[in-house]
């Protein structure tokens, strides 16, 4: 792997707090609803605006559900894994810290018996073509702590019967996402937008919603 000869205009991107978006200033905080309940009418309107603008900017299909959830991208992906995995076998793909963390959760906390793990060292990718379209698939699109991203989407079948769970926190707003290939997608405002890490966002395809409505996991939800 060769060291890049060019850097972006602002290279301050990492697994921690990231640079604000271009053009951001303190003026963006004017009208912030500090101390207001999220149940207040103006606050509810602001939340709805965030959801609708996120769907528009990211090109999320109209029939996908999208919402704001607590605990950053971690909260979003964890609630998805705990609520929807276990209905069928799962293939886990990991090549950096966060993906490896999801593997640990599925193996040691959910303790799924039918779990295949495909893992690679930092700077490399596992064999993505091992993904079975009849099984659920969990992966990160862009490895936050390694900088290695999924190079193509052909390994995700269009006619899959399993669900694809994509941690897209370092991909959303930075690169196009093939929504037709993705059923459960999570991200936060921290990585690419340089926003607060307290909240995450979750997008669900109609098939993911059907899983939620038809499947009850055998473990208590935290």
Image: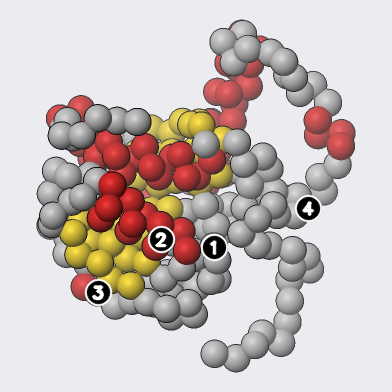
Q: Residue shown at 43%/33% (left/top)?
A: 66
Q: Which mark is residue 144?
A: 1
* Mark 3 lies on residue: 129
Residue mark closest to the camera, 3 vs 1: 1
N-terminal of the pair, mark 3 or mark 4, is: 4
User: First in sequence: mark 1 or mark 4?
Assistant: 4
Quadrant that contains the C terminus: top left
Of callouts 3 and 1, the N-terminal one: 3
Residue drawn at the location 24% of the way across and 39% of the way down: 84
Secondary structure of the residue carrying tag 2 is: helix
Report the Cα–Cα distance between label 2 and label 4. 29 Å
| Residue 181 seen from this side | no
Q: Is residue 120 at all visible to an observer of this figure?
A: yes
Look at 79% across and 68% down and name the residue there. 9
Give me the disc on residue 22.
4
93 left or right, relative to 55 = left
Q: Give me the C-alpha separation between circle 2 and circle 3.
A: 17 Å
Sequence-first disc among 2 and 1: 2
Mark 1: few/some/many CA within 10 Å (<14, 14-19, 20+): many
Image x and y of residue 68, in percent = 50, 31
Pointer 2 residue: 99
- Depth check, mark 2 against mark 3: the one in front is 2
Task: Give the alpha-carbon distance from disc 1 to disc 4, as whole Å.
Answer: 20 Å
User: Is residue 113 toward the left or the right of residue 124 in the image?
Assistant: left
């Amino acid at each position: 792997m060769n060291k890049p000869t060019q850097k972006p205009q602002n290279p301050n991107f990492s697994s921690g707090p990231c640079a604000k978006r271009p053009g951001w200033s303190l003026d963006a905080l004017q009208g912030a609803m500090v101390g207001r309940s999220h149940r207040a009418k103006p606050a509810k309107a602001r939340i709805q605006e965030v959801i609708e603008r996120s769907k528009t900017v990211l090109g999320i299909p109209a029939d996908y559900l999208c919402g704001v959830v607590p605990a950053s991208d971690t909260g979003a992906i964890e609630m998805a894994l705990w609520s929807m995995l276990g209905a069928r076998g799962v293939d886990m793909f990991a090549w950096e810290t966060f993906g490896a963390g999801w593997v640990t959760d599925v193996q040691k906390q959910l303790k799924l018996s039918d779990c295949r793990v495909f893992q690679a060292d930092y700077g490399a990718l596992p064999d993505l073509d091992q993904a079975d379209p009849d099984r659920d698939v969990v992966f990160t699109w862009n490895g936050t702590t390694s900088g290695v991203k999924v190079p193509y989407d052909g390994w995700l079948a269009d006619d899959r019967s399993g669900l694809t769970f994509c941690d897209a926190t370092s991909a959303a707003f930075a690169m196009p996402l093939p929504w037709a290939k993705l059923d459960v997608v999570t991200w936060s405002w921290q990585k690419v937008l340089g926003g607060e890490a307290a909240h995450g966002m979750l997008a669900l395809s109609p098939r993911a919603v059907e899983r939620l409505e038809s499947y009850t996991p055998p473990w208590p939800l935290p």
